[in-house]
Amino acid sequence: MICRFFGNPRALASTSFSLLTLILAVVMLCASAQAQPVDSANGATASVKTIIDQTTVVFKDRDISQTDREQKLRAIAESHFDFAEMARSAIGYHWRNFTPDQKAEFVPLFTKFIEDIYLSRIEKYSVEKIDQTIKSASIQFTNERADGSDYAEVFSTVALQDRKDPLQVNYLMRRDGNQWKIYDLTIQAISVIANYRNQFNRVLNSGGYDKLISIMRQKAQALGDSLAK
């Protein structure tokens, strides 16, 4: 399922992974696969590979505590994902009606919410399960396409043992100073952020900002309690 938040989200066809679990799998797969990146030593593709390499180091450390692992993964995410852009895009046209205080409140809440979903999925997988996934999968970076000087899309395919056909996994990137950051991912042409936008807009249209924030706080509390167990 894709980013389950409210309602019943659209499912990825013929896959047993939820979207965020799949993103975890993608991150883990890239380290071991015989990936053939495009020629982009300092570009967006190189940035994606850096995220993958850093995350893989954390997962391969068998001696690290759960708390330290979570802290390291949050630091990697916050360094390489453009959560402010993701939050704005997830809100869509409603963003222009948010007050400065609402914007300042929403971005960190959205950031923590996304991180907690990701971490909650990770906790369901053992080291052995991750090792099995790594050994049975392969990835290829197939292209990098620039959109002006500050935006790019990195194209890849991911072959998983339980799927007949490879998944198309693309990273949408934005230049932030001298660094490329991810602001969306698409899997089988389905956007993570577009899914959230559809769900957030339904809540904003029916109950406004206060209702959205209230639901997000409830979800964040539940996720936090789950991670604390």
Image (tube, helix red, strand yellow):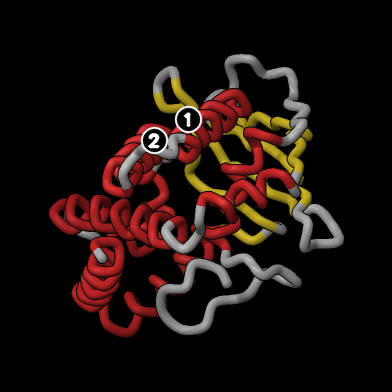
Q: Are marks 1 and 2 in contact (CB under 8 Å)?
A: yes
Which image quarter is the N terminus in?
A: bottom right
Residue 33 appears in the rendering:
yes
In the image, 33: left or right of 7?
right
**Residue 48, located in which quarter of the rendered image?**
top right
Q: Please, is residue 182 above or below residue 222 in the view?
A: above
- Could you tell me residue 90's position as x and y percent? 42, 59
The residue beneath circle 1 is: 54
> Which element is circle 1 on?
helix
In the image, 179: left or right of 103?
right
Residue in view at x 53 percent, y 62 percent: 194
Residue in view at x 47 percent, y 73 percent: 4
Residue in view at x 61 percent, y 33 percent: 152
The residue beneath circle 2 is: 76
Q: Nearer the viewer, residue 200 or 34?
A: 34
- Could you tell me residue 27's position as x and y percent? 57, 43
The label shown at residue 189 is none
The residue lying furthest to the left in this view is 101
The numbered mark, 1 or 2, whose residue comes first in the sequence reads 1
Disc 1 versus disc 2: nearer the observer? 1
Residue 92 appears in the rendering:
no
Q: Nearer the viewer, residue 2 or 101?
A: 2
Residue type marked 1: Gln
